[in-house]
């Protein structure tokens, strides 16, 4: 298992419990998460429920029932997506990445799965039908199958020589973790503020990193990555003033951000492997498909990939047959959400004028007409094409999530 992010850790647990001998490799000396907050949709939550980890995630995270976007100039709500059309108890859970990582990592440690840290994988070597992982720290193997969960910059994708499409996206974001503030913000919603599509600010309640810790929120500011250096040079006070001009209620959050060193710059790219598997190697999560986080599906897709891979291996006569089945199980759901994300991102992150105008004037009005509220909820929740049914996770797991 190359990579100890959410997808890699979940896959390691699922495969180990199915009887496979699993070994994890992580480039950091101490495994750790990168970034601030994320939303676990019903799809990802169903996988965590199948692992028996939903109660701990629910205890740490913040239950989210709506996505609300407001125009910074007029104050008018231009985006309001509720999960309620899917059922009265359907929801997401927003968590800090550290909380999700800790829950999965603690489970891996409790089950005594071997982890080699400080192993910066550079290449894959093959001989005699087996695979070895190579890093400056040495060579490890042999393995019947390497699961690449190293993310969009994985060095193993080059060697697999699989057909792919990849291009950087113009906009990224800076993310920070701040104390949760009730005043002016909803505890059950991701709240965003826009000025056209060139400015997007978000506040997401993410619960606690640990049960006895303080309540936190993730704060993000959309930008072009190449402008971050100039933003830093201009100073934190100038940026705070600009944010306050768009959203005065964020003052308490901004006071908690003392400098840009407390923010993480995220660069986004659209990348898709046409077939996420090769000879003795399979790709999950951002290694297989990366895109803008506009629909908030990244971690959920990785968890679904992990469940699909475990299911495919359980029912196959050979590794090759299992990898073909894994690709089939995930093909259309991944392609649909890649297309949706690529299509919708310019409405929220771009220099355009017409697309955000259409978003604010037309989409906000039409979105209230049935069946669009249900369709938007299904899209945001990750449940279009019903991926959980294909993975046989649509019954007990979903009932626990909705409880």
Image: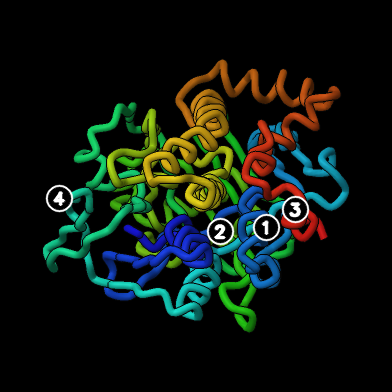
Labels 4, 2: front one? 4
User: Which residue is at a point 72% across and 56% down the rendered structure image?
Assistant: 397
User: Badge 2, how many Cα within 10 Å: few under 14, some, many 20+?
Assistant: many
Q: Can residue 292 be seen in the rendering of this structure?
A: no
What is the x, y in percent for residue 102? 50, 72
What is the x, y in percent for residue 215? 64, 72
User: What kind of element bears circle 3?
Assistant: helix
Instruction: Measure how far apart labels 4 and 3 are at the Cα level.
Output: 43 Å
What is the x, y in percent for residue 286? 41, 44
Front-lying residue, 348 or 94: 94
User: Badge 3, how many Cα within 10 Å: few under 14, some, many 20+?
Assistant: some
User: Which residue is at a point 37% across and 32% down the rendered structure image?
Assistant: 273
User: Which residue is at a point 77% across and 60% down the rendered structure image?
Assistant: 400
Instruction: Measure how far apart labels 4 and 2 are at the Cα level.
Output: 46 Å
Count of marks overlaid on the render:
4
Is there a contact, CB below 8 Å, between mark 3 and mark 1?
no
What is the x, y in percent for residue 269? 37, 36
User: Which residue is at a point 67% across and 57% down the rendered structure image?
Assistant: 93
Please report whichever mark, 4 or 2, sits nearer to the chain's N-terminal start.
4
Tell me: 195 left or right of 134. right
Front-lying residue, 343 or 79: 343
The residue labelled by disc 3 is 398
User: What kind of element bears circle 2?
Assistant: strand
Please report whichever mark, 4 or 1, sits nearer to the chain's N-terminal start.
1
Front-lying residue, 151 or 97: 151
The residue labelled by disc 2 is 218
Labels 3, 2: front one? 3
């Amino acid at each position: 298992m190359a990579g100890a992010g959410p997808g890699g850790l979940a896959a390691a647990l699922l495969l180990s419990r199915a009887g496979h001998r699993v070994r994890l490799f992580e480039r950091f000396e101490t495994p750790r998460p990168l970034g601030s907050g994320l939303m676990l949709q019903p799809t990802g939550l169903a996988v965590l429920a199948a692992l028996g980890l939903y109660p701990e995630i629910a205890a740490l995270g913040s239950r989210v029932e709506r996505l609300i976007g407001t125009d910074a100039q007029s104050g008018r709500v231009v985006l309001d997506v509720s999960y309620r059309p899917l059922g009265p108890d359907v929801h997401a859970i927003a968590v800090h990445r550290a909380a999700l990582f800790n829950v999965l990592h603690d489970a891996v440690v409790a089950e005594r799965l071997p982890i080699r840290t400080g192993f910066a994988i550079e290449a894959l070597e093959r001989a005699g039908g087996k695979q070895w992982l190579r890093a400056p720290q040495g060579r490890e193997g042999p393995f019947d199958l390497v699961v690449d969960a190293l993310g969009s910059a994985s060095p193993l994708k080059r060697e697999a020589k699989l057909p792919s499409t990849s291009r950087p996206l113009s906009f990224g974001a800076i993310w920070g973790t701040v104390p949760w503030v009730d005043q002016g913000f909803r505890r059950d919603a991701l709240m965003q503020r826009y000025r056209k599509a060139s400015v997007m600010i978000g506040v997401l309640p993410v619960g606690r990193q640990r049960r006895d810790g303080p309540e936190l929120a993730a704060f993000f500011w959309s930008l072009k990555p190449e402008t971050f250096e100039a933003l830093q040079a201009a100073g934190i006070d100038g940026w705070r003033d600009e944010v306050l001009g768009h959203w005065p209620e964020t003052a308490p959050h901004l006071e908690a951000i003392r400098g840009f060193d407390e923010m993480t710059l995220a660069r986004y790219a659209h990348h898709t492997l046409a077939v996420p598997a090769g000879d003795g190697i399979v790709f999950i999560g951002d290694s297989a498909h990366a895109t803008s986080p506009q629909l908030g599906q990244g971690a959920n897709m990785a968890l679904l990939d992990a469940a699909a891979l475990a299911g495919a291996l359980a029912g196959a006569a050979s590794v090759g047959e299992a990898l073909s089945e894994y690709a089939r199980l995930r093909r259309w759901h991944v392609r649909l959400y890649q297309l949706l994300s690529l299509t919708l991102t310019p409405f929220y992150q771009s220099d355009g004028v017409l697309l955000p105008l259409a978003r604010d004037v037309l989409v906000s009005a039409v979105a209230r007409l049935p069946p669009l509220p249900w369709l938007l909820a299904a899209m945001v929740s990750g449940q279009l094409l019903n991926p959980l049914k294909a993975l046989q996770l649509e019954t007990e797991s979903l009932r626990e999530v909705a409880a």
